[in-house]
Amino acid sequence: MPGSIIARTGLLVVTLCLPCGTVSAASPFTAMAGSWSGGGVLSTADGGQERLRCRATYNVGNGSAQLDLNLKCASESYNFDLAGDVEYQGGAVSGSWREATRNASGTISGRASGDHVDAAARGDNFSANLSLTTRGGRQTVSIRPQGTNVTNVSLALQRR
């Protein structure tokens, strides 16, 4: 019987301390901070592809919970200048974006875990799914627009 009381007391202590001992995951924004450059491929609905050259800058603040981003890419026929303000909280990312060359803007929301972010960008005239992974000095970005001639943008960036 005394062992049973000890076991129940131990279970109660463990149960009560679970929320106390839970540590929130580190922000994926921390590894992104700084300047990046590289290139990739833009794919179109008619099967065409164009090489892209890109530069990205990520400014991280507020204890790594805030990210100001700027991504500029250009190819022979396309260019885009994407900026955004994104927040990270408890695995969720949310914020706003704007694209200067097309005068488009909207919201962004998604999930982040470890070195990976999956998000959806939505606006009045544009929507896309985004995937971004940062490992050390390398970053991969995938943008999959909907309802445009561009079907996919795949980028490989390196820290400058």
Image (cartoon, rainbow, N blue to C red):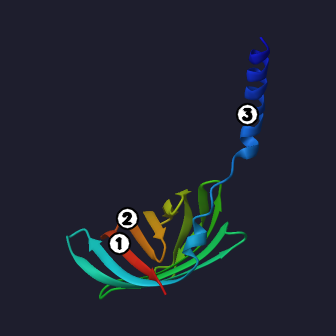
Write the residue at 73% across / 33% down: 14
Residue 149 image position (x, y, % from top left): 30, 70
Earlier-in-chain disc, 2 versus 1: 2
**Could you say whether the residue bearing mark 3 is in a helix, strand or loop?**
helix
Label 1 Cα neighbours within 10 Å, binned few <14 / some 14-19 / many ≥20: many
Task: Using the rendered image of the protein, determine whether residue 11 is visible from the camera's viewpoint.
Answer: yes
Instruction: Tell me the amino acid under the disc marked 1.
Output: Val
Identify the disc placed on residue 105.
none
From the viewer's side, name the closer residue of 8 and 153: 8
- Residue 138 vertical placement versus 88 (above, below): below
Q: Which image quarter is the N terminus in?
A: top right
From the viewer's side, name the closer residue of 125 and 130: 130
**Could you say whether the residue bearing mark 2 is in a helix, strand or loop?**
strand
The residue carrying mark 1 is: 153
Residue 134 image position (x, y, % from top left): 48, 69
**Could you say whether the residue bearing mark 1 is in a helix, strand or loop?**
strand
- Residue 139 is left or right of residue 49, and the answer is right
CB contact under 8 Å: marks 2 and 1: yes
Instruction: Tell me the amino acid under the disc marked 2.
Output: Arg
Residue 100 image position (x, y, % from top left): 51, 82
Q: Which of the 4 image quadrants contains residue 86?
A: bottom right
The Cα–Cα distance between marks 2 and 1, rounded to whole angstroms, is 6 Å
The residue carrying mark 2 is: 144
Earlier-in-chain disc, 2 versus 3: 3
Q: Residue furthest top?
A: 1
Identify the disc placed on residue 14.
3
- Residue 3 is left or right of residue 87, and the answer is right
Write the residue at 35% across / 63% down: 147
Instruction: Tell me the amino acid under the disc marked 3.
Output: Val
